[in-house]
Image (cartoon, helix red, strand yellow):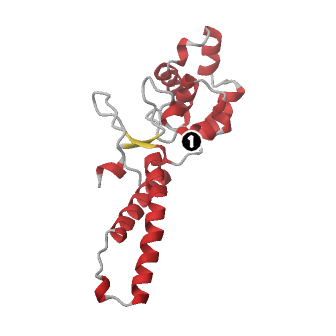
Amino acid sequence: MMDSNSNVFLPIQGMDMRSEYPELSDIEQFKSLSNTKLIFVWYQACQASPLLYLEKRTRCQQALKLSKLEKELSAEEHGRYIQGDYPEGITVALKRMAAFNPEARMIANLSVKNVFNQYTKIAAMEIDPAQQNAETMMQYVNLTSKVTAELPKLISTMEHRFSTAKKSDTEGNVNLMDNVIEEQ
């Protein structure tokens, strides 16, 4: 079950979501959207959106407000959005955003952290060469070489965080330090 204090692709006020979550830049359905439209799509369709369980019309009104997209729309466009009549680019982006699985991302995030912790334990193992035969020493050297070669890749993956973040607190402060950092 997903941690109720966690989120995926959490919009950060004043930041472009594609800068905060580079993965979004690689997704065709999001490339042509402005940041405000992408934030609207997140509020409307992401499984981690706090608006997801609101009635459709209310969710749309709140998403328009929170994303600030309402300021960019004419009265006619605003009315079409409220009725669920979106431009094609928004419609395909909504479908794509709805496909993200926050729980799977959190599990993957924790799994990578676990692998990292295990690898660092292997890399930190101390053995006395005088007490080991040549075969055991060669196995140790091979193992630690492979582990140290993998550590930078794991760090990069952990820093990517599977686009997960901690939700904001009651004052609206956002803590982007995810479980990888907190639990070490």
Residue that sits furthest to the top in the current view: 75
> At 71% from the left edge and 28% from the top edge, which residue is drawn?
88
Residue that badge 1 annotates? 23
Query: Compared with residue 134, is residue 41 higher up or lower down, i.e. above or below?
Result: above
Whether residue 106 is visible here, answered yes or no, is no
Tell which residue pokes out farthest to the front in this image. 130
Q: Nearer the viewer, residue 58 or 27?
A: 27
Whole-percent x, y for residue 180 in the image: 36, 52
Residue 83: quadrant of the picture: top right
- Left/right placement of residue 28 relative to residue 116 reads right
Identify whether 78 is placed above or below 133. Answer: above
Image position, residue 107 (x, y; %): 44, 56
On-image quarter of the C terminus: bottom left
**Residue farthest to the bottom, as pictured:** 133
- Picture quarter containing residue 137? bottom left
Mark 1 lies on a secondary structure that is helix
Q: Amino acid at mark 1?
A: Glu
The answer to whether one can see residue 128 in this image is yes
Q: Residue at x 48, y 19 (%)?
A: 65
At horizontal 54% and vertical 15% (from top left) the residue drawn is: 70
Q: Looking at the picture, does residue 7 appear above or below residue 132?
A: above
Q: Which residue is located at x 45 percent, y 36 percent? A: 10
154 vs 118, left or right, is: right
Q: Nearer the viewer, residue 162 or 63?
A: 162
Give the image location of residue 151, x and y in percent: 44, 60
Above or below residue 63? Residue 22 is below
Q: Quadrant of the N terminus?
A: bottom left
Mark 1 closeness class: few <14, some 14–19, many ≥20 residues within 10 Å: some
